[in-house]
Amino acid sequence: MKNSYNLSAEALLELYKTMKRIRMTEEKIAAHYREDNMHTPVHLYIGQEAIAAGVCANLSKDDKLFSNHRNHGHYLAKGGNLKAMIAELHNKETGCSKGYGGSMHLVDNNVGFPITSSIVAGGVPIGTGDALAASTLGEGRVTVVFMGDAATEEGVVYESLCFAVLKNLPVVYICENNLYSVGTHLLKREKEQRVSKKFEGILPVYTVDGNDVLAVYESSRKAIEHARYGRGPSFIEYVTYRLRDHHDTKTGVEAGYQSQEEWDSWKEKCPIAAFERILSKENLIDTDIISGIEETNKNELNDAFRFAEESRLPDVGNLYNGLFG
Amino acid sequence: MKNSYNLSAEALLELYKTMKRIRMTEEKIAAHYREDNMHTPVHLYIGQEAIAAGVCANLSKDDKLFSNHRNHGHYLAKGGNLKAMIAELHNKETGCSKGYGGSMHLVDNNVGFPITSSIVAGGVPIGTGDALAASTLGEGRVTVVFMGDAATEEGVVYESLCFAVLKNLPVVYICENNLYSVGTHLLKREKEQRVSKKFEGILPVYTVDGNDVLAVYESSRKAIEHARYGRGPSFIEYVTYRLRDHHDTKTGVEAGYQSQEEWDSWKEKCPIAAFERILSKENLIDTDIISGIEETNKNELNDAFRFAEESRLPDVGNLYNGLFG
Amino acid sequence: MPWTKITQSDYFEIDDNTEAPTSRRLKYTEAVREALDSALEIDKRVFVMGQGINDPGGMFGATTGLYKKYGEERVFETPLAEAGLTGIAVGAAAAGLRPFYCHNRPDFLMLAMDQIVNHATKLNYMSGGQCNVPLVVWATTGMGWGSAAQHSQALHGLFMHVPGLKIIMPTTPYDVKGLILSAIEDNNPVMIFEHRKLFNQTGHVPEQAYKIPIGKGVVRKTGTDITVVAISEMVAEALKASKKLEEEGISLEIIDLRTIKPFDEDIIINSIKKTGRLLIADTGWATGGVSAEIAARIGEKTFGLLKAPIVRLASEDVPTPASYVLERAFYKNAEDLEKAAKALW
Amino acid sequence: MPWTKITQSDYFEIDDNTEAPTSRRLKYTEAVREALDSALEIDKRVFVMGQGINDPGGMFGATTGLYKKYGEERVFETPLAEAGLTGIAVGAAAAGLRPFYCHNRPDFLMLAMDQIVNHATKLNYMSGGQCNVPLVVWATTGMGWGSAAQHSQALHGLFMHVPGLKIIMPTTPYDVKGLILSAIEDNNPVMIFEHRKLFNQTGHVPEQAYKIPIGKGVVRKTGTDITVVAISEMVAEALKASKKLEEEGISLEIIDLRTIKPFDEDIIINSIKKTGRLLIADTGWATGGVSAEIAARIGEKTFGLLKAPIVRLASEDVPTPASYVLERAFYKNAEDLEKAAKALW
Ligand SMILES: Cc1ncc(C[n+]2csc(CCOP(=O)(O)OP(=O)(O)O)c2C)c(N)n1
Ligand SMILES: Cc1ncc(C[n+]2csc(CCOP(=O)(O)OP(=O)(O)O)c2C)c(N)n1
Ligand SMILES: [Mg+2]
Ligand SMILES: [Mg+2]
């Protein structure tokens, strides 16, 4: 049963649910952060949900996703375990990284989330190497590497793209251009607002509205298939905005580096609200369905937080655990 | 008195003389290298002379040139002191770097040759920073940064170009694409033979025949003027070939990584022989004039080698000299 | 939230300079800012660069508003390209400017190692003295609140090994202003590692510009039994521990090294002549770090004077864990120092 | 021309393994090649990468022709992008392959520091043990013939400071084969620093694959008066010096450390129990280097056993100069070691 978006109703609803789940998780983290039970920096994903949701809808568990400091949404969209994530934020042994990583280093081999670096762009060559291994071993899987706009300024990204092209690797680079690096606007750091332009001479690049989940889905689907069928890497820039501060829970307006007008205009373009309008028009959701989804999320989140709070802290004696593998 | 090349006869002859002087210097170095009086690696410039000659004809002493390991030709074309260069190769105190640098680190503040790094691409950001200083201080001078094809693979080059564009710096990047990195052909390292293509999305790039000194002169003239008049950086790729091995004195054929056919075809395109043909046609040189130039060079070279041989070695007690400035 | 706030070390307060007539109480970061302000004012060649230096946070206040006073040509934001930008700073320095390059964390300096190790520190030497590089690289060491393996490293020990560098690690507002002004005036690359736990300290700082010589330590507390050479935030831990130890009859002499490269050998040796015992406390890893060099060099020079082996209190050979219980096991503090001192006594 | 040739250390010859039935005399670089050949043969996950590994020079013979036998997918040339390619190797290792990444000189590793210090060595720890990185990084240290400041650094001392690394520095053909095979089999990042002056050494090497444990030193010469802990090429210098010193009645016990991280403390301490004197000889800079860590750690553990201060023979805190007269002043050799030993006696 395909509709005008060339996607089944289930698939459309799934995209919506993923976004909602991420949003509600982030909001709950924000609400509880001041209670000081999560001793970890948090980089919230609020406003960018369409990207993780749209991209990951094209991935299987065997495909791998390389994330960055802003990884909560990526992890959940990739099928991550909510309990393990919330426990990691609570510094617990039951966390997906056993309490050794914290919010910036969610890792979960069960869902193709193999490492997460908080060095900006640090994961980009590593993801490229993962694609090299996949290609060498003939695994047929695809690697997706997420990065921010500022990450594209690091030389290793350039080096990685060139190598991926040279070896025709099954990798898709996803750039979430939210216009800011911490509190610094893109145009203080770069000549052009479209960061993918820099790579036009190297590989196929696309610039897409990152707040339109269907556009994200469709563009990444093509790039991922392209990679999967051995036609090589590509680079997609999704233009978006984060509605909260770089880390912590307030907004960039409150933090003093974004204007109210700018923020408002992007709030208008909220990817979830926008998609809700589409789904309503298609008669795929109504307030009851939305409430149902919210209820499910709320319960799941309450469980996850309870689980996290009740979990044990790592054993102090295990300081050296994991130093060597 | 301009001719069809839009250059005075003197200017044309000057280009020729520069190339000849470089060639004869390199050949003399090669001839004497086995005598073991020059304890220094040598990266000969034979075959690439048109680039240094053509570019530097557009520079004044105040303009600065950032070179690399293959710097003999750059140094001479920039007005370097032949005696000081040969003395440096002989490890002498009278060398342009006082014997502390050797062949890979010719430096001479008197002629705008401020540092020379032998880390591939290491000088590229440094040259960019020099242009930043020139721009900040309003000095009106231009910085020219030389690099090889392999250097363009380093992330710092990408980072430097982006920054030069952001700040609209008075810098021209010159890439000598001689198709090889030591014994490794370009196509083992890159997808495309035209290395400048990678930067098309970042700044104006040009690909020019690097064995045609007039084309080099003209293309670099435009780019240098562009930079000088505050219109920003550009990147020129000169396609060329080195007729000797990466370092040392034999050829790449003898070293086993270049084919005789390839080498022969480039030998045919020798920039000096090609320019000789043009100048003859224009009646600007004949065998007598050439002999005269050769004689002058020979004498100058003999003097320089004698000077170098007779110069003192650095004082062993001065190991710490120059550690701090 | 300590990741956005600065952890307060409430026990640490030294008034180096209460007598200076123009002296006021300033916070550590205010003293840094005042140093930069002075340098920008006095010397037109000075400029400041870094990620986020002009955002509202302004490096914890160390750079706040400077761009408004001196313009964005002299106080500018950089792209995220630490390798290239370090090279650019080196080039600008070699061409006559005086860059002050700010980093939020030493971890990010790993991207700039080629320019620091192979270039900034070598260009003058390998050019026969033609190219000095008056570059200052400033990095603030973070810790705690789950900063974890890539956002909390105290990497000054790595740089100890690099010839041609000077490295300062000031602990007081008075020192940081004076040492930063010396660093900027120096014709060579100087690295500054500052510990965030010190940022809220207050102390007396004279209003005018003044300099403190690079390479000189200072005795923060005199004592008779054990010489403690403390680096950066460990000075605070040592002072705290010394109070308890005093009650138990162990008297520490605490040396704040201030400069780790070159470090003040004499001040340590003179103290050992009195105490016969040396404990070195560093915020970085022990293995191959600053404490190793101090132990090796001082051990050689005080052989026979020492009544007990030189002891090092520094991080174990493991990355920083995230969870606070593991963090507590990882970081050495006043209690650990107390224990180490007792064992040495 | 020594820059393209390898400097011969004619005085150095140790036959570790003459008894093994399949043992033949091989050059050092042939032993390296044989190790890589074995590893590629035995384990399909192994691959070799580096600049120039497939060119006719083939890393002084260490990689010659391997790509013909195993294909260019498993033995490939890299672009000049040490930072990115190290990350790529890390990613491939984490995904189940076993990269062996060759570098012509440690100087170039400075471009890869972020991936080594912040990633390769930390991913397993910070993921709670989910991501081990079986990566081998191999670098050959050059010296002489005017290699100068950027092409001659012995930088192993920097890496000593990094948790999560193992570092080996084999001196004999027998050791290099066995240690490379151990390194490749290790599930963690291992760095190998080889000194080019050792490359023409020959020695007996068994034909089959064998391993030498990481972390174990070996006594190259027994003696009674001074323990010399020698690293890499310094073993050759120590052996040379010991002959002269023997004539003058000073007997050196020479320990070839082989692994510097973790290093074999017991073998050193046991020797000191006999000699009471320690001289550490390293090819890198003294300040903050390997010799500092050995002196600090062993000094602490042998306090009371030592009859004299621990002495370090290592490079002065200055870059490598180009001119051969200055090179001679810079590099420590057998004569310097002789002098240091006499002074210590
Ligand atoms: C190499 C490096 N430099 C600086 C930082 C500090 N830092 C952490 S996140 C960040 C901003 C990154 O911006 P972007 O890549 O656009 O991602 P976003 O936060 O906007 O999602 C910075 C500068 C870092 N972690 N790593
Ligand atoms: C960062 C770095 N990696 C590797 C080397 C070793 N190396 C010296 S020159 C060279 C080849 C450079 O090729 P290219 O840039 O094309 O210049 P060319 O020699 O052809 O003029 C290499 C690999 C180096 N010096 N620096
Ligand atoms: Mg961003
Ligand atoms: Mg080339």
Image (cartoon, coloured by chain):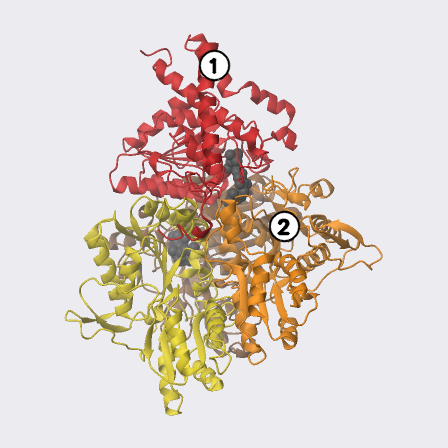
Chain colours: A red, B brown, C orange, D yellow
Q: Nearer the viewer, residue C9 or C196?
A: C9
CA distance separating discs 1 and 2: 46 Å
Tell me: B184 left or right of A21: left
Q: Nearer the viewer, residue B296 or C35?
A: C35
Which chain does tag 1 point to?
A
Find out whether the residues at labels 1 and 2 contact each other: C-beta distance under 8 Å: no
Q: Position of residue C178 (x, y in %)?
A: 72, 58
Residue B196 appears in the rendering: no
Q: State whether label 1 is within 8 Å of ligand 1.
A: no
Q: Which mark is residue D122?
A: none
Q: Position of residue B10 (x, y in %)?
A: 52, 54
Please, is residue B308 above or below residue B23 in the view?
below
Q: Which element type, helix, strand or loop, lies under badge 2?
A: helix
Q: Residue furthest front?
A: C248
Which chain does tag 2 point to?
C
Please, is residue C25 above or below residue D242 in the view?
above
Residue at label 1?
Answer: A291
Residue at the (37%, 81%) spot, across then down: D253
Residue mark closest to the camera, 1 vs 2: 1
Q: Position of residue C90 (x, y in %)?
A: 57, 54
Amino acid bearing label 2? Lys
Q: Nearer the viewer, residue C192 or A33?
A: A33
Residue at label 2?
Answer: C197
Q: Which element type, helix, strand or loop, lies under badge 1?
A: helix
Amino acid bearing label 1? Ser
